Structure formats: structure tokens, C-alpha cells
Image (cartoon, rainbow, N blue to C red):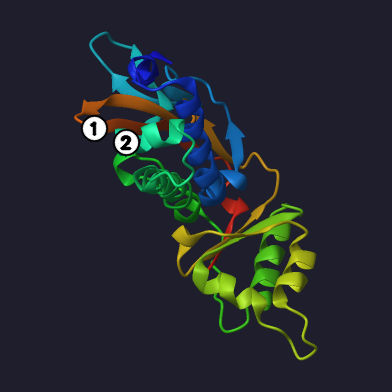
Amino acid sequence: MANLKRHIAPIDSDVWDFIDGEARRVLKTSLKGRKVVDFVGPKGANFAAVNTGRTISLGTVKQDGVRYSKRQVLPLIEIEIPFTLNMSEIDAFTRGAEDIDIDSLVDAAKKMAESEDTAIFFGVEQAELRGILEVSSQKPVPVTGNILPSVAIARKQLLAEGFEGPYNLILGPAFYSMLFDSNERGYPQKNRIESLIGGSIISAPILGKKGVLLPQDSADFEFISGQDISIGYSGQKEDILEFFMVESFTFKVNAPEASVILE
């Protein structure tokens, strides 16, 4: 893609494959939100907005009896994160070295995953993008010492709204550690909860002291991707090569009642 300017970078395809591969490795383990929502796209770097099917009235203007309205859309937001690699490390890679310093690349990938997950779960206020926890219309379920009963209550609430299982349970670190507590028979709560929800339990550091139960394989939450996470080239300053990681997306909640927050 032209906006990535990869063709002007002073590195060959093997180096690009290495950079892309290392980024994918980090992103695969760090991205949590897109694993539990419906991923739509990617639709391309030139895709700018999602139609909501709704309008906003502009009232009656100038001519009598003529009413104007504006189509309501969800504009995509774009995230760009810079990182650098030392040319000496690139040269070492081409000679067969395996201990390449890619700390800046790894940090950028982790920041990208954190930014995306924040948007999905908490929204982005400046962009008027609303996240799952922000719009949930279900009554939150408190967790006090034992997480299993709270998950059972959350499951019951989703069933009452017509959302049948299986479900995914996404937990911040404070709750995820509770999964490995055993009952009097030595049976871990994790196994019992997995049987209860029929889906996956996912650790999401961005949730902190919260969790959320969602229907699995549902279009109730849509992550619409324009340009999926990509890496481009910015330029060179002496021996430092400058790159950037970029993506564009928006997030759409179609059913606020399809999530129950644990807190």
C-alpha cells in the first residue's frame, strides 16, 4: 500500500518478512478484544465511515416545508505508533544473527494492542466511539471472593434477555487469578466455569479489576476494520531506521444488553 512507503525503505523482502513476523507474534498474544467480537473487514485504507442507517434532523431551513437531515455514520479512527530499528541490527540479521534487538518494535505492537483493546472495551471519548463496558445495559454483578457464583448470575441475566450460550468470559488480572482456586475437592474453578459457559475464558490485562461475559460468535459487537494493523517506513536518521505501525477501525455495539460486567 502506497501510504506505508515500504518501497523506499533500504531493506529487502527478507527483512520485511522478519519485521512483519515479529509484530504478528506479539500481536497474536496481546490482542484480546477482537477475539471475542465480530471482526468485519479489512475494508481498505480508504474506507472512512460505517453507515448506521439513522439520520439527525437539521430542522426546517430557508424554504417553507423543506426539512433537512444528516446521515449518521461512525467515522473510523486511525492509530499510528512509531518505532525504530538500528541499521547495524538489520545488517546482523542479514548475516544470520538470531539475537536481534527489536525492543522498540515489540513495545509498539504492545501499545497497538492496548489501544485497540481500550477502544473495544472502554471506547474513545474524543472520537465518540463507545465500548462494551460503557454501553452495557445489564446490571453489573459484584464478585466477592468466589467468582463462580457471579459468573452463574451473569449467565442467567444473558439467558433472560434471550442470549443463549456458549459464552466468552473476559477477565482482568484481579479476577483471572481466582480461576485457579480450588474447592474442597480440589477441583479448580476454571474447569467448572468453562463447563458453565461452554466457551472460552480470556485474560485481558486492560480490564484490571473488571470482567465481562458475552455471547460467543455473535454480531452484537462489531469491530469494523479499514486498514488492518500494518507496518510502514518513515525515513532514516544516520544509522536509525524509522518505522510506524498503523491501523484504522471503528467499533459498533448493536445490542447493549448482550454483555454483563463483573466488578
Above or below, 2 relative to 173: above
- Expressed as whole percent of the image width and height from the top left, the position of residue 113 reads 45, 46
Q: How many marks?
A: 2
Q: Dot 1, crowdedness within 10 Å: few (<14), some or many (≥20)?
A: few
- Which of the marked residues, 1 or 2, is nearer the chain's N terminus? 2
Q: Image check: 135 left or right of 193? A: left
Dot 2: what SS? Answer: helix
Q: Residue at x 39, y 44 (%)?
A: 102
Q: Nearer the viewer, residue 223 or 104?
A: 104
C-beta proximity under 8 Å, tags 1 and 2: yes
Could you tell me if residue 263 is visible in this image? no
For label 2, the residue is 88
For label 1, the residue is 239
Q: Examine the image and state in which quarter residue 25 appears.
A: top right
Could you tell me if residue 64 is visible in this image? yes
Q: Nearer the viewer, residue 262 or 248?
A: 248
- Expressed as whole percent of the image width and height from the top left, the position of residue 11 reads 39, 23
Q: Examine the image and state in which quarter residue 12 appears.
A: top left
Q: Residue at x 56, y 45 (%)?
A: 28
Dot 1: what SS? Answer: loop
Q: Kindly identify the amino acid type of the residue bearing the numbered disc 2.
A: Ser
Q: Residue at x 36, y 45 (%)?
A: 124
Q: Dot 2, crowdedness within 10 Å: few (<14), some or many (≥20)?
A: few
Q: Nearer the viewer, residue 59 or 219?
A: 219
Work out which residue is located at the far bottom of the displayed protein and give it. 184
Q: CA distance from mark 1 to mark 2?
A: 7 Å
- Expressed as whole percent of the image width and height from the top left, the position of residue 98 reads 49, 43
Q: Kindly identify the amino acid type of the residue bearing the numbered disc 1.
A: Asp
